[in-house]
Image (cartoon, grey):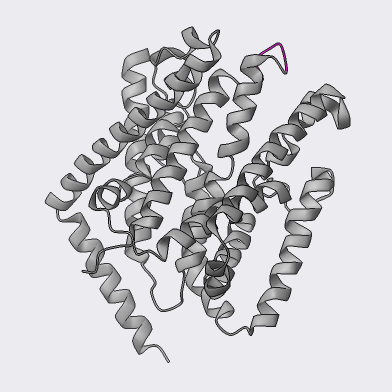
């Protein structure tokens, strides 16, 4: 099997670390009074640089999507893994706190249907749609694809950024399959225009990412400072996944890794770790873990009065959490392999691929 280009594997690890760190500051620093105080600004400052992480995963999916490969078995495996982590963590939590509910238990063992993980629900539905979206995009000429993206960005990004949510077409603020599909299409466009992207220097993309991140934080600061459009209640307007600021930030940072992929980087460690980086989300972002991890189990709060130390400790612990989650997932994958579950799923993939090839 051909070794994967590590540039995108490094991006996946980096994006997952950004997500975990973002959750850490969300639980311990964001919206901590006094507003615009040191801790509050640190939380929103780190958030400004990490908010694009989810979009990076969407863009990566779109970048590689095509209609020829429909890995239905992979979708099933991730669905089962989501059920496993959601249900097992609930059982362990119930044992620890001595509280159990049949209704809650059923909900946690049906995490996709009950939206315990919004990203996994979006990912599963989006993954099922990928081959059909790709088939449609493959029929479009360059100008048609550009017009399509222009329409989508106008009504699902620009409109979402500057108009009240209640008046927009997608009121999820990017937490849903509509925005995921928009990002898939933009990711596909990036791949189609890879040559043009490679012509521009990396520092240009990286510079725009940094400047946009600073602008995102500045928007939060000014909205609160001058009590614009409701002040604190609307301070996250330009942090929304489908805002124009986060879109620009996401695309530019993604292009940094597209540029790096041209060097055909090979790093076995990055490839090995990235295979299981989704576990960082499945475990640390479990509804029963998301806040407790950072406020009760890890000693983050004791460092909040020392900003520099807080940033260092929260970053280091985020790395540790990600590595532990990856290790746990490696063990789970090995158990699945020993139980021959992966073999059955592989046979399912082969069967579906054969049926699709014979379909006329």
User: Where does residue 176 sit, x and y in percent of width and height?
Assistant: 61, 50
Q: Is residue 32 magenta?
A: yes
| Residue that appears at 25% across and 62% down | 345
Q: Quadrant of the C terminus?
A: bottom left
- Taking the image as shown, residue 273 lies to the left or right of residue 24, namely left
Q: Is residue 103 magenta-colored?
A: no
Camera-side residue of 25 and 351: 25
Q: Could you tell whether 238 is left or right of 330 in the image?
A: right
Q: Which percent across, then down, holds residue 172?
A: 68, 46
Q: What secondary structure characterizes most of the magenta part?
A: loop
Q: Considering only vertical position in the picture, is 113 above or below 187?
A: above
Residue at 38 percent across and 24 percent down: it is 317
Residue at 55% x, 81% y is 138
Residue 53 in the image: state x and y as whole percent.
53, 45
Q: Which quadrant of the figure has residue 156?
A: bottom right
State the image quarter where residue 150 is shown: bottom right
Query: In which quadrant is the N terminus drawn?
Result: bottom left
- Name the residue furthest left: 338
Number of marks drawn: 0
**7 shown above or below 218:** below
Residues 268 and 178: in front is 268
Q: Residue at x 17, y 46 (%)?
A: 334
Residue pushed farthest bottom?
Answer: 360
| Left or right of residue 89, residue 244 in this image | right
The answer to whether residue 70 is visible is yes
Q: Nearer the viewer, residue 93 or 45?
A: 45
The reply to whether residue 86 is visible in this rendering is: no
Q: Which residues are magenta?
A: 31-35
């Amino acid at each position: 099997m051909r070794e994967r280009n590590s540039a995108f594997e490094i991006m996946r690890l980096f994006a997952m670390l950004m997500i975990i760190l973002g959750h850490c500051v969300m639980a311990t620093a964001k919206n901590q009074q006094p507003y615009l105080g040191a801790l509050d600004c640190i939380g929103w400052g780190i958030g400004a640089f990490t908010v694009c992480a989810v979009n990076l995963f969407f863009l990566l999916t779109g970048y590689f999507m095509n209609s020829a490969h429909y890995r239905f078995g992979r979708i099933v495996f991730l669905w089962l893994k989501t059920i496993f982590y959601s249900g097992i963590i609930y059982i362990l939590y119930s044992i620890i706190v001595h509280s159990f509910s049949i209704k809650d238990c059923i909900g946690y063992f049906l995490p996709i249907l009950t939206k315990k993980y919004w990203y996994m629900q979006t990912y599963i539905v989006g993954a099922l749609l990928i081959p059909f979206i790709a088939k449609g995009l493959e029929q479009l000429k360059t100008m048609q694809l550009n017009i399509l993206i222009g329409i989508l960005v106008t009504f699902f990004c620009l409109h979402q950024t500057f108009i009240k949510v209640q008046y927009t077409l997608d009121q999820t603020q990017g937490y849903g399959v509509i925005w995921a599909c928009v990002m898939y299409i933009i990711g596909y466009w990036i791949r189609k225009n890879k040559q043009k992207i490679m012509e521009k220097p990396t520092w240009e993309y990286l510079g725009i990412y940094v400047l946009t991140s600073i602008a995102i934080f500045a928007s939060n600061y000014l909205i609160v400072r001058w009590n614009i459009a409701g002040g604190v209640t609307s301070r996250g307007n330009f942090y929304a996944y489908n805002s124009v600021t986060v879109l620009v930030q996401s695309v530019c940072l993604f292009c940094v890794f597209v540029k790096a992929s041209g060097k055909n980087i090979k790093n076995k460690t990055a490839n090995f770790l990235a295979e299981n980086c989704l576990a960082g989300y499945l475990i640390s972002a479990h509804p029963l873990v998301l806040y407790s991890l950072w406020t009760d189990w890890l000693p983050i709060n004791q460092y909040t009065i020392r900003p520099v130390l807080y940033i260092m400790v929260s970053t280091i612990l985020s790395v540790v959490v990600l590595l532990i989650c990856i290790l746990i997932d490696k063990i789970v994958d090995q158990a699945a392999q020993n139980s021959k579950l992966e073999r059955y799923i592989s046979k399912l993939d082969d069967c579906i691929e054969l049926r699709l090839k014979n379909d006329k």
